[in-house]
């Protein structure tokens, strides 16, 4: 089976840095995704990690440690529009490569 | 532009009715998926299809049915057997290199 854990909710201040953690326990591993989802909208792709280390894309970075079953999404220079839910998803080759999603972390950015 | 199109965006169903949600993609992706999202529950897999004329049940398939007669299309039928169908439904397809899942804009189904 698969188990993916994320904090339910986080708050941060505009301009600050926030780190959203994701831990997973899966029978296999073939990549981890991060998605952003605004209320009532579809998820949009942020990042994909399959090897250990940090991937940086502008204000967003994603880190993966396969040995620890751990990833984080780092958001810098927070803006009000970053208020959204952030979904972590893991792909397991033993599960037909289907992404399995965590429950998401609701991030609230306040002035 | 390539993408995934879901329709309708909002759908209302009476008790006991079957309804079909449309999902069409022009990305030439083989694999397509249907997820259901409820508040605080994340995305749960209903059905998936990795090739035309083949599909598999996901974690919560009861009360749902699908077909995959064409590569581009993967419609989902919510039957009267689904006891709690009110939810946000998302269709997705996976890129050929398996590095990105593309989502449609979603269909919000409400039972009235």
Image (cartoon, rainbow, N blue to C red):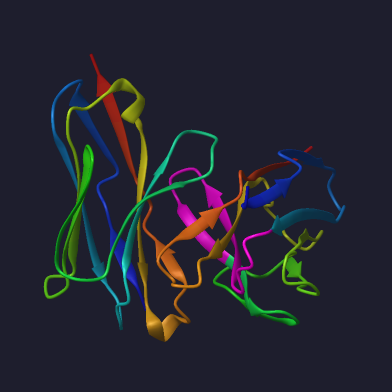
Q: What are the residue bounds of the magenta stretch?
A: B26-45
x then y, percent, for residue B90 = 60, 52
Residue at position x 29%, y 34% in the image = A107
Q: Give the side of residue A35 with respect to residue B62, left or right.
A: left
- Based on the displayed image, in which of its 4 quarters is residue A19 positioned? top left
- Quick one: quadrant of the N terminus of chain A? bottom left
Observer-nearest residue: A38 or B82?
A38
Q: Is residue B43 above or below residue B110?
A: below
- Based on the displayed image, in which of its 4 quarters is residue B53 positioned? bottom right
Q: Is residue A95 above or below residue B22?
A: below
x then y, percent, for residue B107 = 67, 44
Q: Give the side of residue B94 with respect to residue B109, left or right.
A: left
Q: Give the side of residue B38 with respect to residue A14, left or right.
A: right
Count of numbered circles on the image: 0
Residue at position x 34%, y 59% in the image = A33
Q: Give the side of residue B37 with respect to residue A102, left or right.
A: right
x then y, percent, for residue B58 = 57, 73
x then y, percent, for residue A13 = 18, 22
Residue at position x 18%, y 70% in the image = A69
């Amino acid at each position: 089976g698969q188990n993916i854990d994320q904090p339910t909710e986080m708050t941060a201040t505009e301009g600050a840095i926030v780190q959203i953690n994701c831990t997973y326990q899966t029978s296999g591993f073939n990549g981890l995704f991060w998605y952003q989802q605004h209320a009532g909208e579809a998820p949009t792709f942020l990042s994909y990690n399959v090897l250990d280390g940090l991937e940086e894309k502008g204000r967003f970075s994603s880190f993966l440690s396969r040995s620890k079953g751990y990833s984080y999404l780092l958001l810098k220079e927070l803006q009000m529009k970053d208020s959204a839910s952030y979904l972590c998803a893991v792909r397991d080759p033993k599960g037909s490569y289907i992404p399995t999603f965590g429950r998401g972390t609701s991030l609230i950015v306040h002035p | 532009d390539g993408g995934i199109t879901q329709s309708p965006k909002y759908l209302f169903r009476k008790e006991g009715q079957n309804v079909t949600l449309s999902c069409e993609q022009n990305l030439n992706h083989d694999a397509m998926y249907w997820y259901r999202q409820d508040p605080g529950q994340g995305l749960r897999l209903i059905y998936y299809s990795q090739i035309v004329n083949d599909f598999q049940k996901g974690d919560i398939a009861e009360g749902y049915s699908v077909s995959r007669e064409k590569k581009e299309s993967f419609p989902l039928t919510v039957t009267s057997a689904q006891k709690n169908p009110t939810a946000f439904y998302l269709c997705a397809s996976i890129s050929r290199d398996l590095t990105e899942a593309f989502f449609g804009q979603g269909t919000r189904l409400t039972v009235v």
